Image: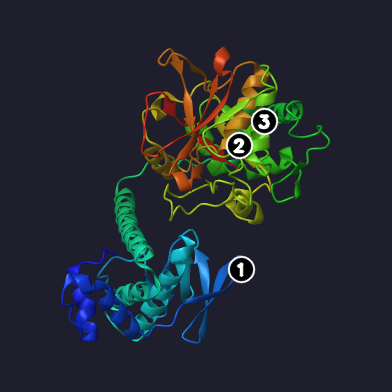
Amino acid sequence: MARISEGHVSQVDKTYGAERPDQASDARFLESVTENIKFSRVKILEVTELAYRVEFVGKEYEITKDEESHFESFCSGPSGLSGGMGLSLRQTLELVQAPGIFQDENAPEEFMEAMMLHEIREKEYAEAGFDDAHDRAVHDEMLYALKYFDPEKRQEYFDFAEAYRARAQELAELKREDEEAERERAESPSEPIVVITPERVAEIIEKLKLEEQYAKRLETLTTYEFIKSLENTVIEGVDGKNYPAPTLEQIIVKLTPEKAGLIEKYIKKPMLLIVPFAMPLKSIAEKAGAKKGKLEQKPVYTGYGMESDLPDRSENGEQLIYFPKQYDQIAHGGFTKSEVLSSSGAHNTFPGWQVLVVDGTETTPEDTRNKSAIDLKVEFDSLGLSGLTCEEWLTLHAEGAFKGIPFDVLRLPRGVEKSETWNLAAYLKNRYSVPSSYWSPAEEHLKVILSIERPDNFFWWLGSRRAVRL
């Protein structure tokens, strides 16, 4: 939504049959206009974990919390505040979700009533058959702000709404580009499918020395006090629940022919990682850095909140998102740690733990460097591969330190020796940043470094480790 301009005010003038005599009478003019605006105020009656209970014009609505504000009805696909200006109603779209109204739970609280008003009104207009439902709702939204917001808050809201819609249009364009790229990939000749037989899987397991690697990983987890002993492998998660480490047999069952083929084709020096994902990130970082190397004082430096994975988020409002589909502040498609732990989906195959086979080279592969996180994620996703989370890199670091061969070493001054890893499977949405990690062995910097970079940045020393999740 644009700022209130002469054109906008003239629109209101015509609507109510008023004329502005001169600039000095703005206050009296707006007062007379607002007296004629008959909208009731949107009242938020209750906020639950999943929704808002709202009253408007004597009717109650349940508005679902979501990543963006929009509505869905039986006669249209998603639309709403996040739609573009002048968006026409599409009568032919198939219903993809149950109809309802959705509110961006991350929007400023003081603006939510106006956003909800927009969605309620646009849904009503659309279901009444108006082709210009969005434009009508925008008009109502402006009148609502004129009536209920003071001048300063009103202008702040108009600026916010304008930026919000612009961002939504950018996302829609990116989605269209992704879909077009996907169509082109589907139409282009693909690599021949390599069939991995059960016998070949057994050979790959033998080549990986999976049983030996499993025993060594548990030994490292015990040494760094992630688990109490080889017999007692239980960890406590951020949700207060206990999670035992997966057994070797459970891991082997998940090594399907498809995953075995990916490991054989793409993973350099394959290393099994068994990661206590459910534990708080801060605890994992402190344990990974506290042994080997006299790091008892300040073992970790971080460029973001170390409690950003906790259910209540952090005091700075930061929150790590895991396994995002894309690096976007609204439509990232990922999950908080609590959401991963409470799910039974692909990202929680081993409850409370992540198990993967990762590039075990001392530095990030050369062919992944000087590429942005965005480009690497697209590349990895297209191949069926994954990047690492912060927790996974820290577990990898602990393994390297235990062996006396640390991974991703940065030496100062720059250019002497440097390797840094994108943690592609994590995203700090409020900063539009992807975490990265490295180990600094210089005396004045003897510590683990957890940093952040914009996902569109790229550097010659910054790459990513490929991984196959089991």
Q: CA distance from mark 3 to mark 2?
A: 11 Å
Q: CA distance from mark 3 to mark 1?
A: 35 Å
Pointer 2 residue: 391
The local secondary structure at tag 3 comes to helix
Residue found farthest to the right: 231
The residue lying at 41 percent from left, 71 percent from top is: 114
The residue lying at 53 percent from left, 40 percent from top is: 196
| Marks 1 and 2 in Cβ contact (< 8 Å) | no
Give neighbour class at mark 1: few <14, some 14-19, many 20+ (Cα, 10 Å): few
The local secondary structure at tag 2 comes to helix
Residue 207 in view, yes or no: no
Residue 382 picture location, percent across and down:
41, 44
Q: Which mark is residue 286?
A: 3
Residue 453 picture location, percent across and down:
43, 35
Residue 402 in view, yes or no: yes
The residue lying at 46 percent from left, 86 percent from top is: 57
Q: Amino acid at mark 1?
A: Thr
Q: Which is more foreground, mark 3 or mark 2?
A: 3
Residue 86 picture location, percent across and down:
25, 70
